[in-house]
Amino acid sequence: MTKTIGVIGGMGPAATVDFFAKLLAATPAERDQDHLRILIDNNPRVPDRNAAIVGRGESPGPQLAKSARGLERAGADVIVIACNTAHAFGEEIEAAITAPLMSMIDATADAAMARKPSRVGVLAADGCRRAGLYQRAFEARGVEPLFLADELQLDFMQLLYRIKAGDTGDATRLRMEQLATGLNARGAEAVIAACTEVPLVLSADALAVPLISSTDALVARVVAFAIQG
């Protein structure tokens, strides 16, 4: 495997560590030299994606594009982003590079389709929802996406920022499970962890339906790209 992977990370840092660890674990390797070369720009100074999309903050687009250019100059054959919401700025990133930008959104939606669902529950941050990233992806695949009600979405966003602050304790885990099972109760045949903080506290064992982690889906696609091209 000779492909070099460029990762735009730091959104947040713990989610980037989780992505990196899962990428290592998923790579078939018996020695150091069998692993992928991975370049990570862990840049927590990227402006808040959610605030920008709702018009309350600076756009992260220039910073994301700068990271992508730097990774490409350092030798990356493909660029990935360890953040769902940042994909709302994908066009700006793609305009700055010649290497392909691998979509976490498409990887996750494709992974969900293996279950052949007609309806999926989507745990996504405000900016991701406002940008319509998963709405377009699932509607293009003939699947109905379900989202949290507005008052529960507020709870979800508070949870995300608690996780970013390092709170992955029992209360946080329990509340995330409750939000996920609520989507299942409304008819979701799978739940999409459409924010990279969600898998830090929510496991598949907690749900009666499949949990599709956006982190895991992107990891699988990166490994397949590295092996098959």
Image: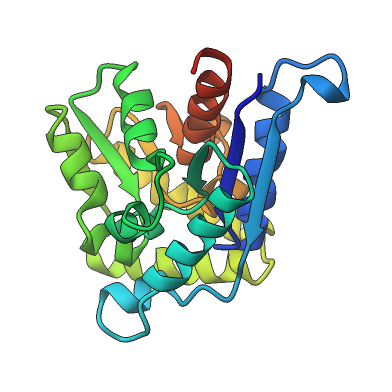
Q: Nearer the viewer, residue 130 or 173?
A: 130
Is the N terminus in the top left, top right, bottom left or bottom right quadrant?
top right
Q: In the rendered picture of this protein, how many numbered marks are placed on residues?
A: 0
Of 33 and 189, which appears nearest the observer? 33
Q: Is residue 196 above or below residue 190?
A: below
> With respect to residue 83, does 79 lie above or below?
above
Q: Is residue 49 above or below residue 222?
A: below
Where 141 falls versus 133 (above or below)? Answer: above
User: Where's residue 228, x and y in %?
Assistant: 51, 13
- For image coordinates 49% across by 56% down, the residue present is 68
Visual colour scheme: rainbow
Which residue is at 34% across, 30% downward?
A: 190
Kindly indicate the quadrant of the structure image that contains residue 88. bottom left
Q: Is residue 110 left or right of residue 47?
A: left
Q: Is residue 152 visible?
A: no
Q: Nearer the viewer, residue 192 or 135?
A: 135
Q: Position of residue 167 (x, y in %)?
A: 67, 66
In the rendered image, residue 35, in percent from the top left (x then y), is placed at: 75, 25
Which quadrant of the structure image shows residue 23?
top right
Residue 97 visible in the picture: yes
Residue that appears at 38% across and 34% down: 108
Does 43 sit left or right of 32 as displayed?
left
Locate residue 227: give its quadrant.
top right
